[in-house]
Amino acid sequence: MDKNLIIQARRANLEEYLKATGNILLKEGKQFRVKNHSGLVVSGNRWYSHSLSKGGNSLDYLIEMEHLDFKKAIEYLLNRKNTIKTENPLQNKRIIVPQRNINDKRVIAYLVKTRMISQNVIIPLIMQGRIYESIEYHNCVFTGIDEYNNIKYVTQRSSLPNCSLRFESMGSDKKYSFSIKGKTDIVCVFESPIDLLSYRTIYHGTSRIQSHMLSLGGVSSIALDAYIERNPQIKNIVFCLDNDATGNEAYISFQHKYLPKGFNVYKHFPQTKDWNLQITHKS
């Protein structure tokens, strides 16, 4: 890719981008704090997440925080370059929900054959429209819904076996991240929908799947705070994060946050790096 295009993407104004996508920026000295994004501050084309201990330029933000791959992130920033300052933030809050394909065969094949997730786990969710295949790119779509079954959150990932592309749709509200409602006072917390589904595959047929299950879409607490507020019966939080440095650091941070609030906090990490690797390695 042309080096000049990469430089332009890195220099794109991140403050304007976040405002245009419906975020609220609160002035703090020479920088802005992004409301509802724990520890995230921005200034011009620079950002830093105190909760993740990482930062960078505008291009890094789309890759690290919105999970776009390198080329997609560049294309997205450059395509928006001339419209960032003129778009209406209120209009951008309307979520973009991808159209569903006439069938979900490719997504089912991806989840079952590549990810080794049980059909018993995914078929009910596909029938409910919580998981489906997009018509344009055949991505695997995961939806988050409110109490009226309205879609408020969409995250997509490629159904191609060797592609790591994943991203949240414009207008997604992380407070309604992908989740499955349970019947107990326990919520199991994961970094991604794939890990959540992998966990349900491992423990299918046991009492563990009676718990509430929530994907954070990373390691931010936005989704968990909102889920607890909507489900005040929850007393126990089980963090089933990735077994790596980020997951362990996040768990310590979550302990400090939720123990003083009266929750029982537990750690249940996979033996491998993440829950999906645990089932694919066994197969």
Image (tube, rainbow, N blue to C red):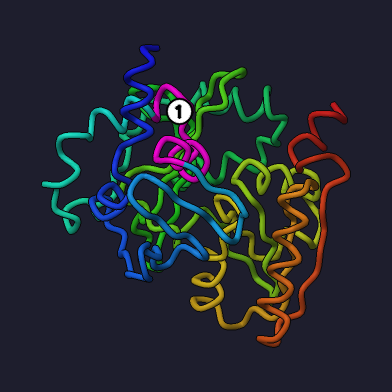
- Highlighted magenta segment, given as a residue range: 57-73
The main secondary structure of the magenta stretch is helix
The residue at the point 49 percent across, 41 percent down is 131
In this view, 91 is above or below 83: below
In reply to whether residue 67 is colored magenta, the answer given is yes
In this view, 279 is above or below 269: above
The residue at the point 58 percent across, 50 percent down is 218
In reply to whether residue 88 is colored magenta, the answer given is no
Q: Judge from the rendering whether residue 233 lies leftward or rightward of residue 47; answer left or right.
A: right
Q: Circle 1 sits on which residue?
A: 139
The residue at the point 37 percent across, 71 percent down is 28
Query: How many marks are shown on the rendered structure?
Result: 1
Quadrant in which the N terminus appears: top left
Secondary structure beneath dot 1 equals loop
Residue 267 % position (x, y): 81, 63
Residue 16 % position (x, y): 25, 50
In this view, 125 is above or below 112: below
Check disc 1 and give the amino acid type: Asn
Relative to the observer, which residue lies in front, 103 or 279? 279
